[in-house]
Image: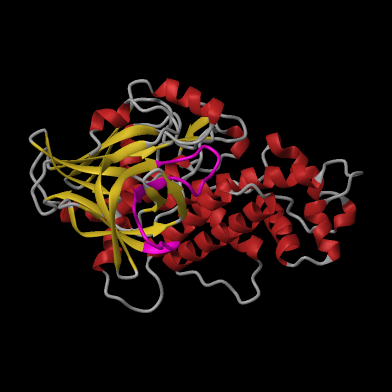
C-alpha cells in the first residue's frame, strides 16, 4: 500500500509500487491460476498511453490469452480486479504476464466518515509557486506544491515525461466529517477547472480518506470521475493564470461549480445545459493546445469560438441568421464580451499575410477573419484553398508563420471568452507580450494592456 510520504519524494518517471509482491490468483475463461504478483503505477516520458495502474503476475499457469481477466489479491479485494492481459512470456517460475488494471482497487470502508480527502496531481504548476485555496460553498480545496517543486520542474524541463507536483486536500466546513459520496460532485468540476488552468489534462490520483490524521481508505484507481483522459506529458509554457490572485481563481471555480449544480438540479429536457456546453468547450480548447498540427488547432479553435458564440447568444436572446458567416458570429461574441478583435502589433505579420491583394480577402483584416480563413482552407480543401495553409516559398510572410499567429490569437480569444463566462476578474497573461492585465479589458486593444 502506498503512503503519502512516498509520493512527495519521488522523482519524475519512476514506477510507484501500490501493492508489493504477494500471493495472487488470475482467472481467465473459467480457469484460475495461482502465483505471485504485484501492482504498480507506471509512466513513461515518451509514451502518452503508458501512464496508469499495471499488474505483473507470474506462476505455473496454463494457456493464457491476451485479453480480459480477473486478478484476485487475497482478502483485500474480494470480488477481484478487472484487468487486461497485454503481454505473455516465460519466466523462471513459469508464465509471466502483464497488463493494465481496468477495475478498481479498494481499501478499507468507503462509507466511513473522514475529515479530509487527500490526493495528488501530476505535471501541474503555475506562478507563483505557493499554496492555492479554491472554495465552493462550505468546501475548501488546498493545492500544495511539493517542497522541492522547482527541482522537479528542472528535471521535467530536461527529460520530459511525468511527475507528481501538487498535493491536494479537500475539507468541508473547516474540518467537519463527511463521507466520500458527498465530495464526488466536486471532483469532476475540479479536474476540468484545473485542466483549463494548466492548458493540459490534470487527472488526480491516489485518493486517501483521512480521519484524525489516520488513513481510512485508499482508492486505486478511482473510476468515479468519468472517462479517464490521457495524461499530458510535461510542457513548460506561459499560462494565462500566472500572476494570479487566489480570490479571483477561487471565484471563477465557484462560478464553474454553480453552473455544474444548476445542471444537476435542472429538469431533463431538450437540448444541452450550460454546464455540458461549457465542458465540451473546455475539452476542445485543451485539445487545440495539445495537438502538434496547426491545421487541427485552427479547426478546433474556430469550433470552440463558434460554440461559445452560440452559448452566449442563447443567454442574450440573440438568434443567428441561417446564412450568417462564422467570422461574424465570432466577431459579435468578442464585441459582446468586450474583447478586441484587432490583430495586435506583435502579430502584424498576420495582417500583412491577409492583406495580400491576390487573396481577395474582404475586410476587416482582424482575428476572426484570420481564424476562419485558415479553417475554411482545411475543411473545404480545394487545391486553391489548400494554398492558404500550405503556402508558397516565395511568400513575404510564410503561411505557417501567419497560421501560428492566428492560433495564438485564437487561444487568447478562447481563454478570455471562457473566463468571461466564469465572471473572472483577475489577472490575465497576454501570450504575445507576457504582460499581465486585470480583466475585463473594457475597450482596450490587446496591445495596450498595461502591466499590473
Residue 185: x percent and y percent?
A: 25, 56
- State yes or no: residue 56 in magenta: yes
> Is residue 438 left or right of 59 when viewed as pictured?
right
> Is residue 171 left or right of 397 when viewed as pictured?
left
**Highlighted magenta segment, given as a residue range:** 42-68
> Is residue 380 left or right of 425 when viewed as pictured?
right
Q: Residue at x 56, y 71 (%)?
A: 320
Coloring basis for residues: secondary structure
Q: Residue at x 76, y 45 (%)?
A: 400
Asked if residue 131 can be seen in this view, the reply is: no
Image vertical order of residue 82 relative to residue 155, above or below: below
Q: Quadrant of the N terminus?
A: top left
Q: Residue at x 49, y 33 (%)?
A: 437
Q: Nearer the viewer, residue 31 or 246?
A: 31
Q: Nearer the viewer, residue 322 or 17?
A: 17
Q: Residue furthest right?
A: 394
Image vertical order of residue 421 relative to residue 321, above or below: above
Query: Which picture quadrant has residue 43?
Result: top left
Residue 256: x percent and y percent?
A: 34, 52
Residue 302: x percent and y percent?
A: 61, 58
- State yes or no: residue 162 in magenta: no
Residue 151: x percent and y percent?
A: 44, 20
Q: Nearer the viewer, residue 37 or 210?
A: 37
Asked if residue 299 can be seen in this view, the reply is: yes
- The number of callouts visible is 0
Amino acid at each position: 500500500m502506498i503512503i503519502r510520504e512516498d509520493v512527495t519524494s519521488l522523482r519524475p518517471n519512476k514506477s510507484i509500487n501500490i501493492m508489493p509482491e504477494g500471493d495472487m490468483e488470475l482467472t481467465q475463461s473459467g480457469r484460475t491460476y495461482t502465483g505471485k504478483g504485484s501492482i504498480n503505477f507506471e509512466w513513461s516520458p515518451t509514451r502518452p498511453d503508458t501512464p496508469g495502474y499495471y499488474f505483473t503476475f507470474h506462476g505455473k499457469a496454463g494457456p493464457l490469452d491476451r485479453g480480459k481477466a480477473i486478478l484476485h489479491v487475497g482478502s483485500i479485494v474480494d470480488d477481484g480486479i478487472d484487468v487486461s492481459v497485454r503481454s505473455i512470456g516465460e519466466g523462471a517460475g513459469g508464465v509471466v504476464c502483464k497488463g493494465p488494471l481496468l477495475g478498481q482497487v479498494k481499501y478499507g470502508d468507503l462509507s466511513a466518515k473522514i475529515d479530509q480527502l487527500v490526493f495528488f496531481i501530476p505535471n501541474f504548476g503555475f506562478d507563483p509557486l505557493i499554496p492555492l485555496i479554491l472554495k465552493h460553498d462550505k468546501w475548501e480545496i488546498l493545492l500544495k506544491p511539493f517542497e522541492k517543486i522547482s527541482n522537479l520542474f528542472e528535471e521535467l524541463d530536461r527529460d520530459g515525461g511525468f511527475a507528481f507536483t501538487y498535493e491536494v486536500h479537500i475539507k468541508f466546513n473547516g474540518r467537519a466529517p463527511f463521507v466520500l459520496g458527498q465530495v464526488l460532485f466536486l471532483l469532476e468540476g475540479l479536474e476540468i477547472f484545473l485542466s483549463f488552468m494548466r492548458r493540459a489534462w490534470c487527472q488526480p490520483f491516489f485518493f486517501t480518506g483521512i480521519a484524525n490524521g489516520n488513513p481510512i481508505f485508499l482508492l486505486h484507481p478511482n473510476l468515479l470521475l468519468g472517462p479517464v483522459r490521457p495524461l499530458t506529458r510535461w510542457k513548460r509554457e506561459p499560462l494565462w493564470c500566472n500572476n494570479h490572485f487566489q480570490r479571483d481563481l477561487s471565484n471563477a471555480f465557484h462560478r464553474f461549480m454553480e453552473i455544474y449544480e444548476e445542471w444537476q438540479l435542472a429538469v431533463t429536457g431538450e437540448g444541452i445545459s450550460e454546464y455540458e456546453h461549457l465542458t465540451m468547450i473546455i475539452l476542445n480548447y485543451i485539445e487545440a493546445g495539445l495537438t502538434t498540427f496547426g491545421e487541427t488547432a485552427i479547426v478546433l479553435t474556430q469550433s470552440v469560438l463558434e460554440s461559445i458564440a452560440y452559448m452566449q447568444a442563447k443567454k442574450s436572446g440573440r438568434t443567428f441568421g441561417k446564412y450568417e458567416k462564422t467570422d461574424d458570429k465570432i466577431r459579435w461574441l468578442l464585441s459582446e464580451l468586450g474583447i478586441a478583435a484587432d490583430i495586435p502589433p506583435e502579430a502584424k505579420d498576420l495582417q500583412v499575410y491577409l492583406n495580400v491583394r491576390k487573396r481577395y480577402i474582404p475586410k476587416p483584416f482582424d482575428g476572426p477573419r484570420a481564424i476562419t480563413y485558415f479553417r475554411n482552407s482545411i475543411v473545404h480543401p480545394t487545391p486553391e484553398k489548400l494554398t492558404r495553409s500550405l503556402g508558397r516559398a516565395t511568400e513575404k510572410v510564410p503561411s505557417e508563420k501567419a497560421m501560428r499567429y492566428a492560433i495564438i490569437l485564437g487561444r487568447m480569444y478562447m481563454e478570455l471568452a471562457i473566463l468571461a463566462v466564469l465572471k473572472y476578474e483577475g489577472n490575465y497573461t497576454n501570450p504575445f507580450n507576457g504582460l499581465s492585465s486585470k480583466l475585463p479589458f473594457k475597450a482596450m486593444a490587446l496591445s495596450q494592456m498595461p502591466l499590473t
